[in-house]
Image: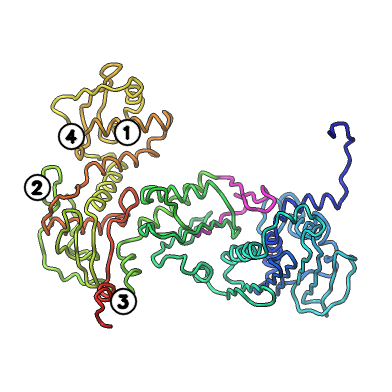
Amino acid sequence: MCNNRPIIQLPDYLINQISAGEIIERPSSIIKELLENSIDADALNIDIYIYGGGIKNITVIDDGIGIPYNDLIISLKRHTTNKIYNLSDLRKITSMGFRGEALASISSITKLEIVSRTKEDNHAWQVSNTDFLLKPWQGKVGTLVSASQIFDNTPARRKFLRSEHTELEHCITTVENIALAYPKISFKIFNKNKIIKQFIKTDYKQRIYDILGNRIQKDSIQVYMSNKNMEIKGILSNNADINNKHDYRYLYVNKRYIHDRMLTHAIKAAYSDISYGRQSPSFIIFLNIDSDDIDINVHPTKKEVRFLTGNVIYQFVSRAVNKAISDFSIKDILIHQDKSAKQEELSTNIPKQVSIEYNYNNKEPIEILTATDINNKEHHLGEAIAQLHGTYILAQNDNGLIIVDTHAAHERILYEELKDSFKSKKIQTQRLLAPIIYRMKEKFVQLVEEHEEWFNMLGFELKSYTPNSVAIYCIPSLLTGHNVELLLINVLEELNSMGHSILAEVYSNKILSTIACHCSVRANRKLHINEMNALLRKMELTKRSNQCNHGRPTWVYWSLKHIDKMFLRGQ
């Protein structure tokens, strides 16, 4: 026990090693700190040499502005920096490195050597932590930092390192994470003096493809939105490909690779009604915001940040991702999936035909309620030619075969229509000739009373009849002929499980999705050709029609080239 031991001031060497424990977790941590210093030095070319997985040696060479002669020795001391001179600088940090602890921390657990030269110097200067003496040296403008014998003087920490191969992979990943945010900088990675990775200067989209390669889907979604305070750009996965296993999640704020639950949740929320099961979206998001609105000094390794206006940023990110998903059309997917498809507009010289829609409740075809002349739109999903087992629509376009899941497609169409109607408070309702009385648990009756206005917005008119029953006077028109009691109980059970203080707008989409699922056309329903075409045209005009409400694909495409290959034609 040490309760009675006197309080002492820790010696510098121990302070440095404690600080190193916060910053330097493994060899890749050293690479991260050194790369950030090189970036702050305006380097355009950075070479990273790794030996023994970074355990034996890490050397980073850049062509930046270099470290002045007078600053070389002081740069190895604790809490030294040229980025922060006062409190206002701390509140508005725009550089990558700023804490003034990295070199001192690295020096405390490695043998460290620095060679640097500025453009004003006639030659380079060298300093090491073995003697802290400045020596004239040969070298170009820029800086070389070499760290070797990592954790040799802290064996208790070194034993937690993994194999050289594993540590090398961590080092490569760290370089890639930083390189993704800096496409205008060239990066080279060497392992035992042999180059293993090289990323040349390019734009941010090409840098993403250079690093992630085939992990990026060909039909990925581009996102971009900006206002006077924020900008977001990046790539999102198209969840139509539910078999895609190459997931990736990269989040950058002001070019810093970070982990942030709030922003990740904002992205996932935008995918909420097109995600299948437990599937999570893949994304590479770059968010740029004013430095006054962010605090990056909340984590030793700067992996986390704090936002001044978190709710505003959350809404901005979610809205941008939602818009990108909504704007990603059927045409976009077809262009990506069929390399041989013509990218000019598809021909619209299709004979004029009566536009009809199927009334799935009355099983009678009716004319469409919309003013849009769908015959003037591009028919990307082609024209229906048959129905397969009452479940799938077969259609052909100029380049191949489209197979549509009728229920899934109609479900999405109804869902989007219900969402629009809900926002404009125009959900069509059906008043019952006589109220229907349903017996239910007392706590459910209380929920009906508490959320009466919200149920009205959804198209229900409900009143408590007794402590254990509810009277239904009006229902959404789409529910005519369906089991309203079962749907209502499901809604109340979920409301009860999620708490009485739930925000209606958060849960409304889930309820509207349930209504759409109950009301959409079921399997084994035979449709006429005109009814199938009406559904195809509706899909082309509906947002997010590539997936149903549960995230399953609504249609798949086989190009003629692919079909010919299946039958060994042209070989």
Residue 524 appears left or right of 308 = left
Q: Is residue 288 magenta?
A: yes
On the rendered image, what quadrant is the C terminus found in?
Answer: bottom left
Q: Nearer the viewer, mark 2 or mark 4?
A: 2
**Image quadrant in which the N terminus is located:** top right
The answer to whether the residues at label 2 and label 1 have Cβ atoms under 8 Å apart is no
Give the residue at mark 3: 340
> For this rendering, which residue is in front, 428 or 177?
177
Q: Secondary structure at mark 4?
A: strand
| Range shown magenta | 284-309
Residue 120 is one of the magenta-drawn residues: no
Q: Which residue is mark 1?
A: 491
In the displayed structure, does residue 466 sit left or right of residue 118? left
534 w.r.t. 485: above or below: below
Residue 523: x and y in percent read 19, 49
Q: Residue at x 28, y 39 (%)?
A: 425
Foreground mark, 1 or 4, reads 1
Q: Is residue 321 left or right of residue 107?
A: left
Disc 1 marks a residue whose amino acid type is: Val
Q: Quadrant of residue 456?
A: top left
The Cα–Cα distance between marks 3 and 1, rounded to whole angstroms, is: 47 Å
**Amino acid carrying mark 4 in the image:** Gln
Q: Residue at x 32, y 38 (%)?
A: 511
Calculate the distance from the C-alpha at mark 2 to the C-alpha at mark 1: 30 Å
Q: Is residue 387 left or right of residue 425?
A: left
Indicate the amino acid at tag 2: Glu
| Circle 4 residue | 430
Which residue is denoted by mark 2 in the rendering?
364
Q: Earlier in the sequence, mark 2 or mark 3?
A: 3
